[in-house]
């Protein structure tokens, strides 16, 4: 028997730059405030974006956390580890597995 699963789409309505720090490795670390629709309700979430000015690589997690302090702490850990954009998802998984 087959069934259809309806998945609610998360849609970013508005993005605002909350904090941006340039590391000594020419990488910009940004904390973004986003307004999203989730299950029909508007929610404020904080995302993380990492942009490498040398290579042009950019990675972003639009809805990292609903807590600004947690998003800033994660951005600080990225800066301390001199993380590049391709490491964002693995570092986020490691950070969230410890903090949950």
Image (tube, rainbow, N blue to C red):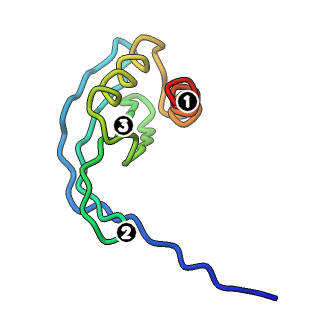
Quadrant in which residue 11 is drawn: bottom left
- Using a 10 Å C-alpha cutoff, classify the residue at mark 1 as few (fewer than 14 neighbours), some (14 to 19) or many (20 or more): few
Residue 54: x and y, percent?
A: 41, 28
Residue, disc 2: 39
Residue at the image point whose x is 38% and y is 47% from the top: 63
- Using a 10 Å C-alpha cutoff, classify the residue at mark 2 as few (fewer than 14 neighbours), some (14 to 19) or many (20 or more): few
User: Between marks 1 and 3, how big is the CA–CA gap?
Assistant: 12 Å
Residue 69 in the figure: left or right of residue 77: left
Residue, disc 1: 87
Quadrant in which residue 37 is drawn: bottom left
Question: In the image shown, does 32 or 43 lie closer to the viewer?
Answer: 43
Helix, strand or loop status at disc 3: strand
Residue 58: x and y, percent?
A: 42, 41
Mark 1 and mark 3 lie on one chain; the one further toward the N terminus is 3
Residue at the image point whose x is 54% and y is 27% from the top: 91
Quadrant in which residue 46 is drawn: top left
Q: Which mark is residue 69?
A: none
Helix, strand or loop status at disc 1: helix
User: Between marks 1 and 2, how big is the CA–CA gap?
Assistant: 30 Å
Q: Is residue 79 above or below residue 61?
A: above
């Amino acid at each position: 028997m087959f069934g259809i699963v309806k998945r609610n789409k998360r849609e970013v309505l508005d993005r605002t730059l909350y904090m941006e720090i340039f590391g000594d490795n020419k990488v910009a670390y940004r904390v973004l405030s986003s307004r999203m629709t989730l299950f029909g309700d508007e929610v404020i979430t904080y995302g993380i974006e990492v942009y490498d000015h040398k290579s042009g690589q950019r990675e972003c997690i639009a809805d990292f956390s609903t807590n600004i302090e947690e998003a800033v702490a994660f951005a600080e850990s990225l800066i301390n580890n001199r993380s590049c954009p391709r490491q964002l998802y693995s570092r986020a998984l490691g950070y969230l597995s410890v903090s949950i």
